[in-house]
Amino acid sequence: MTLVIRTVRITRRGAVRLTQLFLLPVLLILLWWWYSSASASYYMTTPGEIAATFVEVWFSERFFVDVLPSVGLLLTGYALAAVLGTTLGVVLGLSSRMRATAEPVLEFFRAIPPPVLVPLLMLLVGVNTPMKVALIVSGCIWPILLNTIEGVRSVDPVLADTCRCYGVRGRRWLTTLVLRSASPQIMAGLRQALAIAIILMVISEMFATTSGLGFSIVQFQRSFAIPEMWSGIVLLGLIGVTLSTLFVQVERRVLRWYDGVRAAARDE
Amino acid sequence: MTTPTTDTARPTTGSQRPAEGRVRGPGAAFPFGSNALLGIAGSACFLLLWEIAPRTGAVSATYLPPASEVLTTLGERLLVAGFWVAVGDTLAGWGLGLAIAFTAAVTLGFVVGSVPALRTFTASTVEFLRPIPSVALIPLAILLYGTDIRSTLLLVVYASFWQIYIQVLYGVADVDPVADQTARSYGLGRLARIRYVVWPSALPYVLTGVRLGAAVALILAVTAQLTIGSPGLGQEIAVAQSGGATALVYALIVATGAIGVLVNVGVRALERRVLHWHTSVRGEIAA
Amino acid sequence: MLDVNGVQKIYRGKDREVEAVRDLTFRLEEGELACLVGPSGCGKTTLLKCIAGLLKPTSGSVEVAGKAVTGPPRDMSVVFQEYGRSLFSWLTVQGNVELPLKEKKLSKERRRTLVTEALEAVGLADSARSYPWQLSGGMQQRVAIARAIAYEPRVLLMDEPFAAVDAQTRADLEDLIRGLWQRFSMTVLFITHDIDEAVYLGQRVLVLSSSPTVVQDDVAVDLPAERDQLTTRSDQRFTELRARVYSEIQNAKNGQAASAPAAT
């Protein structure tokens, strides 16, 4: 008897949760469906048509020719920027003199909207894979670098003294004290950089290449292949959502302690 | 109370993690004057290097014109009315987009944030829509609006809306329950509570959102001009590049960088001005 | 064991100099537990940093076990006041205690023994796998104390370690320190601004003057070695000693010299 009640209760709770998750998305899709079939606009496509086109267009060799290389580029550039940015950031963060010297120049570079580097790098490196990687690195590195500097700079002095007292130095000092203390800021930098990396990947391809995701989407748009264009937009969205979800998973793991500290501080 | 400062804002998918900065340790080891001097020295070194490298042929001057040439080109541009029109267009796209995003995000954020049911039912949609890169909308913008300023606005608004909206949600959620209960016990109505309790608590978050949103808005404004060709500095750069005018490309990049710096400095000043009460509170906690 | 000889510390600012510590000389014998009290702002923390080798004194010297202190000495551990900030939030309790031992290049078994022993000694054997932020303030300070003990120091420095915990916890921790001192036979220098605490804990109380600091008085605490919060604190002798230290500190605030130097 109690088992039945409990099962009913769990099922009910599950149903409520599902409703919370899917009610609005389903409503929005229905609204879109209704609107796109009712409106005479040439540019609107029904969700059904987009889904069908999506399967047709992207579940083909296109996935290997256009999508995978683009994502690969993005991740390569992003990883390079992450390594370079944190390394440089730690070096600058530890030396107040070097930091003071470099900061105005770095702040200026950070303030340059990264997309303007596209035409520049096209001039300098030409239109090829290294150019795209260089572009992503040069756009992504600034938030990572500046946040790392900020994080390293704000290492707690008491904790630093503790390390000195107990003779913690060298590699262990770097990994247990400096990098871990700075990790909340480093992750914040990496998060901003991820968004910039996606933007740069797409527009570098839209601008001047003959392959890749950005190129394909612009091609569809220029040839007025509207359902195909929509499917490309959806794919970009999915890539963005996937990368961001992965990032959150990593971040949650890395910053578990930080969230714990914060929660403890709030409860006080 | 947690305080959003610098770039530690970490709006996270799915979890209630408000933006926050950490309390800083004691200030830098050098007094302000020598820091500023070092900064000037650093910038001077950078400019010198930029000047010398192409002149000695270490880097080809076709690829990297010396600093003096770029700055002269920029100086000449400053006298051309067309340049200021482009700057105006860029700033208009940026400012208008940011204003629209701000109004929408703050209104929606406060409404959704203060009604728990709305919050739970919209959460999944927000988490899906937010990470969609706004550049994905470029083809759509071109189809719908062509090179019109509305193309720029579409991208700018989409990108900066989420930054502000998420922060507002965090801010509304961070309201001190004791303060809220106090206000209730004194019989303050819903509107009064929003005005006197929720708004001040959420303000630091709103401003963090504005700061992040302002930076993103500038990026997207320039992107739209570059890729779509709507008028502005981005378009000027694209034109200069296709004409092979390297020095001009550099000069215009320096100009956008300068605008970026101004935007950052401006938003930070605004933040400091509006939140001076807040930092003083924080100073006490830090002690 | 711990020799402080004519230590002076002057902070040089941009256009002014602040003499925080003028001329401090005192000596702790092996196995002694001494408390250092002084009016607030008297340079206690500066002195601690000089002894711990974190700050270089402007003149004078510090010797630990006959060796001059130039950097943090290996056989000394320090417990800071700000427990929350001296623990690594990203390491477990066990990890925090073990970290300095790893740097000492001890074997894994030895490390495990030391960690277990230290945690058990401070009554935290069950919390080894928790994170510091999951513990209360008093428990966090216990972790810091366990870390200090596991390091097997000959000298233990404590900088107002209980200033930020509540009174109840504070009494427990005071008894804990007495117990640990007797069990591990270390030399302990305990810095505090609390007169009761100084008299209750120490075999000796060093009273500092206000800044620029000198040793104002050196009071021997002739209370029995077995102390407990109830009887010791209500002891007539305890009250006398407390009154004496109190009046010295009042003198120190008013800038008068010691009324009766170092003899009780």
Image: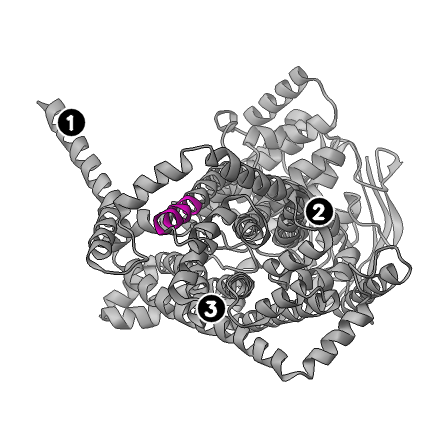
Q: CA distance from mark 1 to mark 2?
A: 54 Å
Question: Residue lying furthest left in this view?
Answer: A1
Q: Which residue was labeled with disc 1?
A: A7
Nearer to us in this view, B108 or A242? A242
Q: Residues within 10 Å of mark 1 (few under 14, many from 20)?
A: few
| Disc 2: host chain | A
Magenta span of residues: A226-237
Q: Is residue B235 visible?
A: yes
* Residue C174 image-quadrant placement: top right
Indicate the position of residue C182 as horizontal and vertical percent values.
Answer: 65, 28
What amino acid is labelled 2 in the image? Val
The Cα atoms of the two marked residues, 3 and 1, are separated by: 58 Å
Mark 3 is surrounded, within 10 Å at the Cα level, by few (under 14), some (14 to 19) or many (20 or more) other residues, namely some
Q: Is residue C6 placed above or below C20 in the rendered structure?
A: above
Q: Position of residue C217 (x, y in %)?
A: 76, 52
* Coordinates of residue A88 in the picture (x, y in percent): 72, 48
The residue pinned by badge 3 equals: B147
Quadrant in the picture for residue B198: bottom left
Q: Nearer the viewer, residue C139 or B264?
A: B264
Instruction: Confirm or deny contact between disc 3 and disc 2 (CB under 8 A).
Output: no
How crowded pointer 2 is (Cα within 10 Å; few <14, some 14-19, many 20+) is rated as many
Q: Which mark is residue A90?
A: 2
Which of the two marks, 3 or 1, is nearer to us in this view? 3
Helix, strand or loop at label 1? It is: helix
A228 magenta-colored: yes
